[in-house]
Structure formats: C-alpha cells, structure tokens
Image: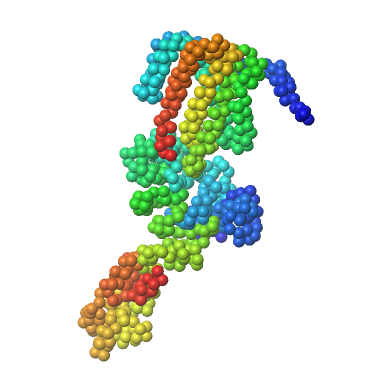
Amino acid sequence: MDFPIRIPVGKWVETVVNWMTANFSTFFDSVKVVIEFVLVQLDTFFIWVPWPIAMLGLTVIGWLVGGRRLAFITGACLFCLGSLDLWEVGMSTLALVTTAVFISVLLGLPMGIFAAKSPKFDIILKPILDGMQTIPSFVYLIPAIMFFGIGNVPGIIATVVFAVPPMVRLTSLGIQQVDKEVVEAGIAFGCTPMQLLLKIQLPLAIPSIMTGVNQTVMMALSMVVVAAMIGAGGLGSKILYSIQRIDLGVGIEAGLGILFIAIVLDRILQGITKKQQDAIMQQK
Amino acid sequence: MEDEISPKIKCENVWKVFGPTAEDIIKNWDQYKEMNKVERLAKTGCVVGTREASFQIQQGEIFCLMGLSGSGKSTLLRCINRLHEPTAGKVIIDGQDITALSGLDLRKVRREKMGMVFQHFALLPHRRLVANAGFGLEIQGVSKKECEKKAYEALELVGLKGWEKSYPFELSGGMQQRVGLARALATNPEILLMDEAFSALDPLIKRQMQDEFVKLIKKVKKTIVFVTHDLHEALRIANHIAIMKDGAIVQQGTPSQIVLKPAKGYVEEFVQDLPKTKFITAQDIMDSPDDWLLPIGSSLQEILGKMNEKNLRFSFLVDENGQIQETVDYFSVNSFVDSHQSVEDVPEGQLSPHYQLESVTSDTFLESLLSTAANTKVPIVVSDKQGKVQGIISRETILSSLQSA
C-alpha cells in the first residue's frame, strides 16, 4: 500500500545546500583558509620537532601538571607510539585532533553558557544537539565536502559537529549545577552578571566543563577514521587503509596509536585543572 | 509621618508570591485566604512566600525572623536585598526605597551597605580563605593588596588567624562559617543579613559560635537581621523577634514579650516548653514600689497605718534620692509603736532584726531571683545603679510568675 504523501526533504535540503554553496562560497572559503592555516602550522610544528625533544617536553608538562605519575604515563605512552613507528602520523593526528578540540571548545563553551542562562535557547538547542550526535557522521560528511571540498578541513568540520554537543551540554549542566547559595552569595555581594559568570559560575562548573572537554577529545579521536574517508591524514588514514586491505596488524597498531594519544591528551588537559576540581569536589 | 528616629530598615507590607498570577493573588487575597498551600498551588500555580510583612529595625539592633521551615522567613530576608524581588510592598533602608532602585544602584547598595551570611556557608571552594574573605572587596574593584589586607583583618576578627592560605574543604563547618562571617564583615557593611547562619552546625559548635557572635557584634556594631528556626537561638541573640507562620508575621516584640505574653495559638504553643526562668527578668515581673515605700521621716504610727492598710509584712523607708535607708518589719514596728515616736528613736537594727535586705538589678533573670528569694523573707528590691528603687518583687509575685511559666 502506498503512503499518501511523500515529503521531499532530501530535495529541499539539497536545494538549500546547493544555494548556500553558490552564494556563501566566500564565507566557506575564508573559514577553510583559517582552519587550514591553524592546522598546517600545528601539523608542521609537531612533525618538525624531533621526537626526543617532543617526548621530553610533553613529559615535563605532564610532570608539571600531574607530578611523577602523569610524567611517567606521558613518557610511556609516547614511547609506545614511537616504538610502533607511528610518530609522524601520530603527530598529524594530534594536530588534527587538537585543532578540532580547540574549535569545539571555542564554540561549545559560549553556547553552553548561553544555554544555561536562557531556557528558551536551551529548548531550541537540545534537539539540534541530539541530531548532531545521532545522525550518522557519514551523512553530514556530504555537505561538508560540498562546502569545503576534500581534505583535512571538512574532516575537522565533521569532527567538530560530532564533538561539540557534549561540550555544550556539560558546560550548561555544570553552570546550572553550581550551588544556588553560592550564586546568591555572589549576587548579594554585588556581582555584575559578568563577574558572576567569571568568578563564580565558570570556576565552579570546571569539573563538569572538563568532563565536556574530555568527551570532546574522545569523540574527536573516534572521528579521525571517518574524517580520513574524505581525505584527512594521520592515523585515521592508516586505519582506513587497513580496513580496505583487511590488514589486521596495521589496523591494531594504528588503533593503539590513537589510544596512546588519547591518554596523553586527556590526562594533561585534566591535570591542568585537577587542583581546582579536587577542591570543588571535596567541598561537595 | 516619619518617626523621630528613622529606622535603619523598614519593611512595609512586603509580599513575595512565586508563580504566574502573583499579582492577582495579592489583589484578591480574601478569596485565597482560607485555602491551604496545596489547594492554592493546585488552583493558581502560585506559592505565597511572604505576605503582609511589616517591621522596623533600628540602627544597631539585632532583629530576628523566627519560624519553622516554609514559614517565609528566608524569603522575607531575601526581599531586603532583593535576591527575591518583592511582588508588592516596600523595603526602605536609611530612607532609601530599595524596591525602586535600578540594577546599578541596587548593586551599589549591596556592595557597600549589606553583607550576607548563608546557611551552608556558600564559600568559593576553589579559593583560599584570604581570597574568600576578600571577595566582596574584589567585586568592588579594590586593589589586590588592599583586599588581602582587609581579608587578613576580617579573618583575624573571627579567630582564623593563621588559616589564611587554607582552602575551605580543609576546615570544619564551624570554621567555614567563620569565613562566611569574615567575608561579610570585610566590606565593613552597616547591615548584616544572616540566613540560618548557625543552623548547619552541630549543637556544641553552634552554641559556641552564638556566644562568640554576640561578643563580636558588640565590637563591630552592625544592624543585623537574623533568620533562624531555633527559638532558643533567637532568644539568645536578638533584641527583637518577629515570629512567622505561613508567610506572615504573627507576633513581634522583645524576647521577654514573646515569652511572657505570647500571642494566642501558634506562638503560645511554641513558647510553652521554654524554661521561662531563663528569659524572664526582674523587670518583667516587678511591681511598682509605691506601696512598699515610705519617707524616712515618717512616724511609727504612720508606718503602721500604711502597713495595716496595704496588708504588708515588710516595708522600706527611703530618702529623698529614692534610696532605701531602713527595712521595717511589721511585728517590730508594732512592738515599738507605743513606746517610741519616730524611727530615729528606735535603736539601730531593731526595726527589722532578723531579716536581710536583698537588692538586684532589673536585668536579673528569674532563675537567679529564685535563689535570692530562698535566702530572705523580705521582698526583693530592684534598684538601678545609683541605688534608686525601681520596683519590688515579693515572694508571691515570683511564685505566680513561675506558675504562669
């Protein structure tokens, strides 16, 4: 039996996207230029730094933010990465992920703040975030290619689309969960809305915001393979290669490489705010 | 219209109704009056936080809002600095209508005039104590150095010298509340708003904090609005108490007024278990001294006449300054009246040979009056610092006040 009506959503979206491609090309091009610039600089830098220096540098950073334990973890992970002969591709992936996470936080944090402050915005935003997370990422790769062409940039854009929602949600949640009395205290002592945000709400939301950053990092790393399908480089392309050749060895090694990068990135990012997080959690 | 001494804080018919049709509830209150909270919420979607609250607080007074949870006391407190926007009514501080202020002016008042202390301390957990105590000043844009200096002073004032670099989580509850107090004092506000400040502390610490607080505020001289659900705390700290129920103030007065003349019903029930002897003072129960007093120059005949008339066992002879010179016993006077003319003729001490005069000040508690009364048969004399008689408390009065207590 035929369904009485056929809504041509696909056609509509196609029309809109085509129209946007035609009319906003300058905008998309400038976005592409900016992202590409950042990415290339990072990528070149990470690959340019000789591995012993990079390893030492990151280990020292680990030591500074998390003491001996984190220094050891960082050093060990990076050593493993190098020993799998994945240093250079690993650094490419690191550049890719860093860029994507940076953009995600840049977009997600203010959106989260706004969502926490405006219930209306929150209501509109929620289904959109749900959509961004549930619609398979392959689907929005298509418009990404149409807007930005093939290569790293659409990969990053697709990654950002996938990685922004947890950042927004957890920022918003974190701000909403700040102890009501502490917020009242801020107001009672005469905070302006901006002072309230910067001196009370954001600092106290840090545990939740950092969980958001952690989720964003994980999501970005899980996207590198998908991004590789449209031409992004790094470990993702290795894995893609291994799938096409059914080459388990290459796949496993590249997968482990992603794991090591994930650990280093996450632990260092968490370590930066660990002291503050502990103080806040202990108070609760 | 204005009182002679204008009050520091004045609330005029303040209402706070939460919900969509708040204005309507106030306008048609008679219609909603009889409903209980649940019915009202179901019918209108509104909750009445505080209604028809009016009171005046004088400079330097400790005013206590007392009531059980849900009685609207914290809501009313928050109306004073507009953490809750009053739905109707006026809050006036130093003659300035707080309810009419713009955001900017309100912020200025909050920063400069008022400090607030919270039930669960509301400290910033990621900041050291010095940064917590200096928070109010930091918000005002005071230089970092000045902030720290004032914060150190405030922390020392509340007895936390040496802890400046610690974090709140390293402190016990009582100490954390001291930080809350230091934060409120650091900006040197004229008014302190205290929301159940000691309620979250365990009983021993609570008691200690109350005592220290009373001492402290004698030093710093602030006008204080204190919210509590604990009647003992209110009686211990406050000069004035307003008792609240279902959003409205049911009785206001001094602690002894509340204890001695509780309003019918709710307050009465509240007060009935109190050990009244700890709150009733000599002033509250003393009788006018006129019946007992006679000028020192009176003749024995006159004295006996008055004692017969008033049916007194004892009376006192006073000089022109109102100070007692002699205590006389009816039986002694009776035995001397035939042989002697005036008081001076009787050998010293013979008019009241067995009984010792006891004198107390007007703020003596009934508790200690009891032991005083046990030591003497003579009515207790209440006198001021100069020795002038203010009132007399007979044993009968003490007994009857105990009975009502």
The C terminus of chain A lies in which quarter of the figure?
top left
The percent position of residue B350, horizontal first and vertical second, equals 22, 81
Q: Residue at x 34, y 70 (%)?
A: B382
| Relative to B166, residue B354 above or below | below
List the single residue furthest toward the bottom. B338
Query: Viewed as shown, does residue B235 lie left or right of B295?
Result: right
Q: Residue at x 48, y 46 (%)?
A: B113
Q: Residue at x 58, y 30 (%)?
A: A111
* Residue closer to the observer: B321 or B250: B250
Please provide percent x and percent y for residue A272. 43, 26
Q: Quadrant of the N terminus of chain A?
A: top right
Residue A222: give x, y in percent of width and height. 53, 21
Toward the left, the furthest residue is B347
Looking at the picture, tell me which residue is in the foreground, B102 or A138.
A138
Closer-to-camera residue (B378/A41): A41
Q: Tell me the residue at 23%/84% (across/down).
A: B345
Q: Is residue A255 visible?
A: yes
Answer above or below: position of B209 versus B242: above
In-image side of A261 versus B30 (left or right): left
* Residue B129 visible to an observer of this rendering: no
